[in-house]
Image (cartoon, rainbow, N blue to C red):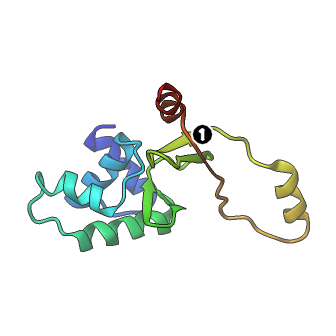
């Protein structure tokens, strides 16, 4: 996504675009690595010398609050962020720590049951943990 599209993307969430916000959202949309605040700051501070970790933190908080990004708490050690906001699950490898996007369908039966009981669902989180194919291949070779 180019900067103009990122600009429009932010506006679609009623976020006033700034150089920092565009750069952070652009990074999230281009890097599907589920980065944490330090990852984003380290990647962008070279290009935006005035960027601070506080700005990254506050910007990501804004993105999550408006629905422009998701916050992942799959790992107890750090909070990660995801620019992909369509419904999907996540898988974290217990060996390498990498987090993968996993397609999933909404649990319609459970959601219908909750909705019929008066619950209003605003978000769901589905996390899987195990060993990724790459790490399985490495352990079977040893």
Q: Position of residue 135 (x, y in %)?
A: 49, 35
Image quadrant holding the N terminus, namely top left
| Camera-side residue of 123 and 37 | 37
In the rendered image, the vertical position of residue 102 relative to residue 133, given as above or below: below
- Residue 68, given in percent of the width and then of the height, sits at 46, 57
Q: What x and y, as percent, mark residue 82? A: 45, 52
Apparent side of residue 74 relative to residue 110 in the rendered image (left or right): left
User: Which residue is outermost to the left?
Assistant: 49
Number of marks in the rendered image: 1
The quarter of the picture where residue 21 lies is bottom left
Which residue occupies 85% across, 64% down?
114
Q: Is any atom of residue 18 visible in this view?
A: no
Q: Quadrant of residue 19?
A: bottom left
Label 1 CA crowd tier, 10 Å (few <14, some 14–19, many 20+): few
Is residue 50 shown left or right of residue 5?
Answer: left
At which x and y percent is residue 8? 36, 48
Residue at 42% in and 50% down: 34
Nearest to the observer: residue 57 or residue 78? 78
Q: Pick the residue in front: 15 or 119.
A: 119
- Horizontal side, residue 80 vs residue 122: left or right: left
**Can the viewer see residue 75?**
yes
> Disc 1 on helix, strand or loop?
strand
Furthest-front residue in this view: 142
Instruction: Answer above or below: position of 95 versus 80.
Output: above
* Residue that badge 1 annotates: 102
The residue under the point 44% across, 66% down is 77
Question: What residue lies at 45% left-to-right and 49% top-to-bottom?
Answer: 97
Image position of 104 with respect to 37: above or below: above
């Amino acid at each position: 996504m180019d900067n103009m599209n990122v600009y429009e993307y932010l506006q679609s969430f009623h976020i006033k675009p700034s150089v920092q916000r565009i750069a952070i959202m652009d990074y999230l949309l281009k890097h599907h690595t589920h980065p944490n605040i330090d990852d984003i700051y380290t990647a962008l501070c070279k290009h935006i010398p005035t960027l601070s970790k506080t700005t990254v933190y506050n910007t990501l908080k804004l993105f999550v609050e408006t629905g422009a990004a998701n916050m992942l708490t799959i790992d107890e050690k750090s909070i990660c962020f995801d620019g992909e906001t369509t419904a999907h699950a996540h898988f974290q490898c217990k060996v390498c720590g990498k987090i993968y996007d996993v397609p999933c369908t909404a649990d319609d039966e459970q959601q219908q049951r909750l909705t019929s009981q008066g619950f209003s669902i605003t978000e769901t989180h589905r996390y899987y943990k195990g060993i990724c194919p790459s790490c399985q291949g490495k352990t079977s070779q040893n």
